[in-house]
Amino acid sequence: MNTSTACTSREFVPADLDATAWENLEPLYRTLLERPIHCAGCLETLILDRSELDAAMGEAEANLYIAMTCHTDDQPARTAFLTFVEKVEPNLRRVGFELDQRITACQFVGDLDQSRYGQYLRELGVEVRLFRTKNVALATECTKLDQQYSQISGAMSVQFDGREQTLAQMARYLEETDRATRESAWVTLANRRLQDADQISALFDQMIVLRDQMGRNAGFANFRDFQHERMHRFDYAPADCFTFHKACEERVVPLMRRLHRERTQQLGLQQLRPWDLKVDVQGRPPLRPFEGSEQLVERTSRAYHRMDSELGLMFDSMRGGGCLDLESRKGKAPGGYQYQRQRSRTPFIFMNAAGLHRDLTTMVHEAGHAFHSILCKHDPLLAYRGSPMEFAEVASMSQELLTYPYLDEFYSPLEAGRARRDHLEGIISVLPWVATIDAFQQWIYTNPQHSQTERTEQWLQLHARFGAEASFEGHQRALETAWQRQLHLFGLPFYYIEYGIAQLGALQLWLLSRSDAHGALAGYKRALSLGGSKPLPQLFQAAGISFDFGPETVGRLVDEVERELTSLPL
């Protein structure tokens, strides 16, 4: 069968469909469920028409989510998103299961081109095997609880330096050279978070109960095992995650803590405190790569045009059409993300920029996700217009490293060297943090009956194993609740080990780029264009890197980072 002919264009979904309402979606999904299938060609057309409909629905949901996170204090936006969650999503899960069943059980499924549809059918098989009607309502409740978490977090602001500021805006004070200012800012932030800590813990308790029930409903001993399979982790298991934890503990944590001890000496301190981790050790003012989002976009555009003309044009395509919401403001949800609007096939980047170097890092990180979305948007199969998160994050994290030669768009040569050092030291800190968050979730969901006190004890044990060499004396409660800042724990359970796996892939690409920048970029774009059409090891291989996160790979890459740090001036 000529798949390319069957996939050239779709006309199943009306152009003016309002996909936010189930009464508009249901007739189209029912048409797919009732359509006769006489051959493999009929089945393929059904799959592609379903993909078009799912894309229309997905974009409707994306727009509602974007509106809600951009304005968490906008009641109509919150209501519209909740209405979709409560009225549309449960029906979508049910009809999606029916379609998954129909496709995988079809007598002609074996006649499809397996090189084209094999990965898709493998993923559908998991969905059919794991679906339970009882879990539809439980998933809806979890989504509603996560929205409450976003609303609580988005409402957090403090009075500092004579004005009201968001928590994202406060981060710049942690880089100030005056230690009293840093301490005051850190304490102000910690105290504000603690005001809602009990409420957030109570929300999380409810999530754990719901998720544990979901796992048991599907026949698993716990939510961890259910979620690992549900996330299509075909190429690694929980045991491999523990191997990653051990590799971080043995190969990364010692370097991180050595760097912290050196920082203590360089700052002339007796003891490092949490507000001392971001300040420049030479007493230089904080890096300020841009003033305002317009300058951030303009400078990033110039950097990408220098790196690769194709990537430069991709970035510029997002400078209109409502593709960017970058600056921090009260009522905006925390964090940053890229969301592909799948029907129009246009990306959206959300972040909370406050003029910091980390904002530049977020910008190029989310741009990497957008490049991924653009490079694979040609595929008519929605399931392939993305990829497993372990590789999706390679797309983004690689950009944090591949942009090193172009930091002069933002900095002087000395500042650019300092920015590279800060970023590499950040990688050495983030890998243990990834291990911490994943190990925390492994414990939480294999011990779902735990108390809040037991959860705190486990968190503190993990901090002792993986944490920074900084004293929290006098601020124990802030340390005990630090996990609440990680939004993935609430809305994306078990989605975090991917950052560690991807960081290792990104480091491999960076090493390749230092000897062959053109070849590394060609491999990067080649792999991204595959979307999710291939298994993880093949995606990594297409980029010229290996899918491996064991101690040997971790150790080799950390050694390279250490060598690079040694060559950079302080």
Image (cartoon, rainbow, N blue to C red):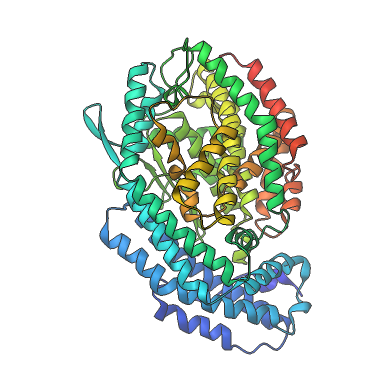
Does the rendering let one see residue 411?
yes
Q: Quadrant of the C terminus?
A: top right
User: Is residue 424 positioned above or below 318 on the image?
Assistant: above
Left or right relative to 69: residue 553: right
Q: Quadrant of the N terminus?
A: bottom right
In the image, residue 80 lies at what x, y percent?
Answer: 33, 66
Quadrant hosting residue 294: top left
Q: Residue at x 49, y 35 (%)?
A: 300
User: Is residue 502 positioned above or below 466 on the image?
Assistant: below
Front-most of 564 and 39?
564
Left or right relative to 446: residue 233: right
Q: In the rendered picture of this protein, how many numbered marks are placed on residues?
A: 0
User: Is residue 387 positioned above or below 470 on the image?
Assistant: below
For this orientation, the residue located farthest to the top is 268
Q: Residue at x 69, y 60 (%)?
A: 533
User: Is residue 490 positioned above or below 34 on the image?
Assistant: above
In the image, residue 111 lies at what x, y percent?
Answer: 78, 78
For this orientation, the residue located farthest to the left is 162
Q: Residue at x 52, y 59 (%)?
A: 345
Front-most of 81 and 62?
81
Does the rendering let one see residue 12?
no
Quadrant hosting residue 424: top right
In the image, residue 187 lies at what x, y percent?
Answer: 34, 29
In the image, residue 83 lies at what x, y percent?
Answer: 35, 69
Q: Residue at x 56, y 44 (%)?
A: 368
Left or right relative to 254: residue 18: left
